[in-house]
Image: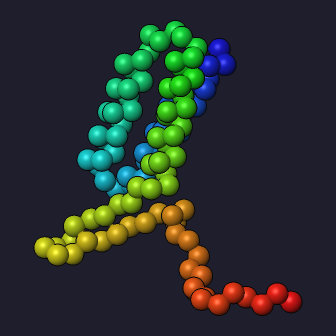
Amino acid sequence: METRLKVLRVFKTLHRTRMAVFKEDNRALTAARLKINEEFRKNIKETSEENIKQMIKMGSDVEAVLRETVLQVEHKGDNTLLLRPRESLLLENVPYCDQPRKKS
């Protein structure tokens, strides 16, 4: 029963991440939904605990890659792209300093 809950948790997390990463991109949202559902359906009859744990790990890793590395880019013209980074991908801009700071 516990394994089933973990599988459902990964399934839901993947879909939530898909919704955040591909927001306002219906084509990508549909493609990701179909792929997630296809992979889970393909392995629905799996009974080996070891294989299920490996697949749960794989699903969690895929979710992390989507969440941390995928950016949305939209074509605006012939040579123009619009980058739409999510808030979680933006980092604080810290100026680079060649000289080490003096310890006080």
Residue 31 in which image quadrant: top left
Decide if residue 14 is on the left or right side of residue 50: left
* Residue 83 location (% of width, % of height): 34, 69
Q: Please tell me which residue is depicted at 46% across the width and 40% down the height of the picture.
A: 62
Residue 41 in view in this figure: yes
Q: Please tell me which residue is depicted at 37% across the width and 52% down the height of the picture.
A: 22
Decide if residue 30 is on the left or right side of residue 53: left
Q: Does 16 appear above or below 95?
A: above
Count of marks, rendered view: 0
Residue placed most toward the observer, 84 or 26: 84
Q: Please tell me which residue is depicted at 53% across the width and 19% down the height of the picture.
A: 52
Residue 12 in view in this figure: no
* Residue 74 location (% of width, % of height): 27, 65
Decide if residue 94 is on the left or right side of residue 100: left
* Residue 15 location (% of width, % of height): 46, 39
Residue placed most toward the observer, 101 or 79: 101
Residue 98 in which image quadrant: bottom right
Q: Does 36 appear above or below 68?
A: above
The C terminus, quarter of image: bottom right
* Residue 94 location (% of width, % of height): 60, 82
Q: Please tell me which residue is depicted at 50% across the width and 26% down the height of the picture.
A: 55
